[in-house]
Amino acid sequence: MTAWLRLVGVVELLPGVLDSQLRRDAELTHYEYYVLAMLSEAPKRTLRMTALAQRTNATLPRLSHVVKRLEDRGLVERFPCPEDARATNARLTAAGWKKIRATAPGHVETVRQHVIDALTPEQVTQLAEIAGAILGAVDPDGDLSALYRR
Amino acid sequence: MTAWLRLVGVVELLPGVLDSQLRRDAELTHYEYYVLAMLSEAPKRTLRMTALAQRTNATLPRLSHVVKRLEDRGLVERFPCPEDARATNARLTAAGWKKIRATAPGHVETVRQHVIDALTPEQVTQLAEIAGAILGAVDPDGDLSALYRR
DNA sequence: TCCTTTTGGTTGTAGCTTCAACAATCACGA
DNA sequence: TCGTGATTGTTGAAGCTACAACCAAAAGGA
């Protein structure tokens, strides 16, 4: 019971803390940051929308709206996938790359401050196991199928 | 890094899972359920808005809107606090009590299924410690002061 | 007493997410 | 070849949250 109530607290509070820092320092929400970060680590800084949605744990409609806004801001660009005419690729622009490079240090520091440094090294290891187990129960196939299983 | 990415995954995915089940079975969001649950455990099933906001890890504007909607649905009622004319009390109605009683078993089952049963007893204990430590770093005074410290 | 600050709460608006509906392409079998 | 169903992605509307502005009452000081 204690564990559950505290986990709920973390789930409610953490997004707000992350969003605040990023909005203040970079005009980004945490999810937008996450999208840019995943793109920046992908080959050619390009990913198909579906793949990007999976890696960011989001639904496709959500991602579609977010990418459109990022595109309007010049941080990302979209173009049709050559192999599959249905698919769309999202690619980080030079401005987007600059943005994530400039933003990452401050964000990492925030995460360290509010999460990692609050835990012992053993607890960090335990957290990885625990969060992994919960993810396995919430999203067994790792493809967000859980979101559509209502 | 692994721990952090997985925690982010949980934070993104868990709310959706909880909301889905509650919306499907009870026409409630998880936060609305939480408000009803906290009231149901309070003396006289009554709490001042500020206290209720703290216990549900929410800002006052958010709570105010939610309580208004719950009041429109007849699950909660508001009345001015006798001791402090500024304050408002929120009280669970009979219908609200019925609602939470009817909804709790299914919700608990969902939580068990997606979280508790996915972990070993030791991990549940570890989770309580870890989540407690993160909460301490995110909201040191336990009064949501962090939310306003931007 | 009077004025200022703090606390408690509400409201309106903007912005993001969810949901349902839709369009287009691909895959597969008759 | 044709049609059916499954993928891929976008869009518009509805709903919830965050933020800022606001009001009223209490607290504290001069």
Image (cartoon, coloured by chain):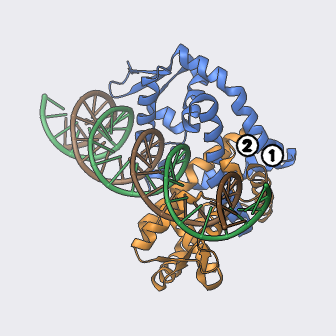
Chain colours: A blue, B orange, C brown, D green
Q: Give the camera-side residue of B33 and A139.
A: B33
Residue contact between numbered discs 1 and 2, judged by CB atoms under 8 Å: yes
Subunit that carries the residue with mark 1: A
Q: Hey, what amino acid is under mark 2?
A: Ala
The image quarter containing residue A137 is bottom right
- Residue B113 position (above or below residue A110): below
- Residue B128 position (above or below residue B149): below
- Residue drawn 51% across and 66% down? B32
Residue found farthest to the top: A94
Q: Specify the quadrant that holds the C terminus of chain B.
A: top right
- Residue B147 position (above or below residue A44): below
- Res B1 seen here: no
- Cα separation, mark 1 vs mark 2, equals 7 Å
Q: Which residue is mark 1?
A: A125
Q: Which residue is mark 2?
A: B3
Q: Residue A61 location in percent, x, y? A: 40, 40
- Residue drawn 77% across and 65% down? B121
